[in-house]
Image (cartoon, rainbow, N blue to C red):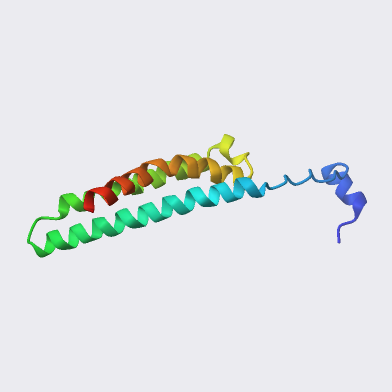
Amino acid sequence: MVNPDTYAALYGPGRPAAPARRERPVVAALAGVLWAATCMSVIWLASLFAIAVVWGAAAGAPVGNMVLWALIPVGGAAALTALAFAPAVRRLSVAGRMLLLGALACPVPTGLAVWTWFQTG
């Protein structure tokens, strides 16, 4: 246990911590919906891509260029990670941060998944 006088001499008078931000359940639920849609879309696109690569390899086609297309989601994930660690975004609450990142991550894979869904029948 630290002596209060010693603590005050070293660090100054004690101050109560700032009150924790209230989490808003609606924001957290919206973030969950956006991330669920994003994850389902990415899973659909990844499985469709894997099927195309396996069929292409079975047919004897070179799949090296197709595998390079897998770097696009990696670049998107890197960009979202960099944004998540930006100082302005880190000041948001966790639910707000996830909502912002989910809103940025959702449209492209979801739109592409819907388009491939209708194109593949």
- Left or right: where 55 falls relative to 110: left
Q: Residue furthest bottom?
A: 58
Query: Residue 19: x percent and y percent?
Result: 79, 45
* Quadrant location of the N terminus in the rendered image: bottom right
* Viewer-side residue, 41 vs 95: 41
- Left or right: where 100 falls relative to 54: right
Q: Residue furthest top?
A: 88
Query: Residue 2: x percent and y percent?
Result: 86, 57
* Viewer-side residue, 37 vs 88: 37
Query: Residue 46: x percent and y percent?
Result: 30, 56
* Viewer-side residue, 94 vs 26: 26
Q: Residue at x 57, y 38 (%)?
A: 89
Q: How many marks?
A: 0
- Left or right: where 11 falls relative to 83: right
Q: Residue at x 84, y 45 (%)?
A: 16
Q: Quadrant of residue 21?
A: top right
Q: Residue at x 38, y 46 (%)?
A: 110
Query: Residue 120: x percent and y percent?
Result: 22, 53
Q: Quadrant of residue 90?
A: top right
Q: Residue furthest left?
A: 60
- Above or below residue 66? Residue 107 is above
Q: Residue at x 61, y 45 (%)?
A: 27
